[in-house]
Amino acid sequence: MRRFPTALLLALAIVLPLFAGTAASTPAEAAAQAILQRLDLHLRAPAGQPASGLSGGNPLSRYAAGATVDPLRVESAAEYARRTLAGAPTARLTPEATGAFLREQAASILASADQAPAEPRLIAELGRYHARRLEAAIHYQLFLRSQRLAELVAATYAEKDAVEHWRAVVRSAEARPAESADPGVRPSRVAADWRAELGRLEASLRDLEEQCCPPDASVLQEKVWRPRPAGELTGPAISPVDPQFGPDGGVRIAARIRAPSGVAVATLRFRAASGQSGFASLPMNKGADGEHTATLPSSLVAGGTLEYFIEAIAGGGAGASFPEPGARPATLRFTPRP
């Protein structure tokens, strides 16, 4: 797992060793692992450069400009804002969907707070912080692209909530028993780093408030972006079918893809693993029982190795892919025909 750039993420050194390479023994630990794995997809070091425009130097602008670990399959806040303004769907993992996922996992941990160990509870607070700050980042990017003050106001309100969640993170870190910390990390140093991060977040919030608040009543009445309910963010279910080789040496890739609102688009993304840098695209054709297929001719798979993944977008606009983002693409090895 990558180490993130801020004191917030450096401090995870006290909890990451407890989960790295080990199987979760409780639902709380499984949820904590899921939170860390999802954050690892959306937050990549180094962070993005400060965005231009108002408040260009504050920590929220750097957070909002950050790249993801895999831009092909995981969407950044900047890309999300650009695509949303264009009204286009995507099969990539979005920051909106990640925010909903983090809240869900955090709630499952905190619902059993009395039984959950200190480390999962700390990670739950971390998940709540990032869920709200991802929303602030989306509002901020929408403001940069539209110059609508209402989006900056919404970003400020979301950032205020994120600061409150970070205070909970700091309290959780300070209350963590010293004897359970990683031997290589001094708990007092970790708590100091996390409290220093709180100071930077508070300064960021003051910067935003000076620019936009208090807003005019007309600004408050404007419609702004709102995250959708978690149920609307669930993409199609994709179940792979074993590939089949044709008599001409081509390969048929198939999957059963289902969604309550129907499947609008299904796409095969593929590359020969023998040195190709990007993935080509091929539409998948819908057949019976929700099966979608695409056939690659022998000329495209002459190397004997194929990497691929499947993307699908439901009729309601939610997307999904298989294998899931963060996992390696499916790999198919075979003996090419002469």
Image (spheres, grey):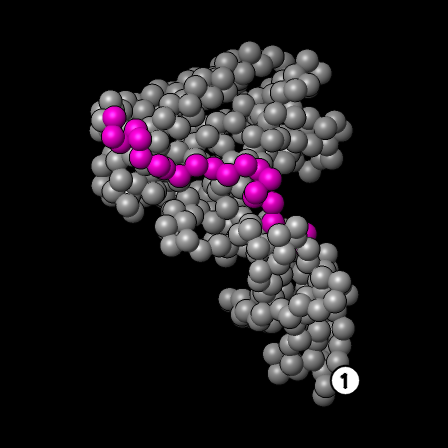
Residue displayed at 66% across by 82% down:
298
**Relative image position of residue 138 (x, y in whole percent):** 39, 40
Front in this rendered view, residue 132 or 167: 132
- Does residue 268 sit above or below 260 in this rendering? below
Of helix, strand and loop, which one carries label 1? loop
**Relative image position of residue 15 (x, y in whole percent):** 59, 27
Front in this rendered view, residue 151 or 201: 151
Which residue has dot 1 on it? 247
Residue displayed at 59% across by 27% down:
106
Query: Does the segment drawn in magenta span residue 160?
Result: no
User: Which image quarter: residue 287?
Assistant: bottom right
- Does residue 293 sit above or below 210 in this rendering? below
- Does residue 258 sit above or below 273 in this rendering? above
User: Which image quarter: residue 246?
Assistant: bottom right
Query: Does the segment drawn in magenta span residue 220?
Result: yes
Front in this rendered view, residue 312 or 229: 229
User: Which image quarter: residue 19?
Assistant: top right
For residue 118, side relative to residue 39 (left or right): right
Outermost residue toward the bottom?
A: 338
Front in this rendered view, residue 55 or 122: 55
**Relative image position of residue 174 (x, y in whole percent):** 51, 13
Magenta-tinted stretch: 217-238
Residue type (three-letter) at the residue carrying disc 1:
Pro
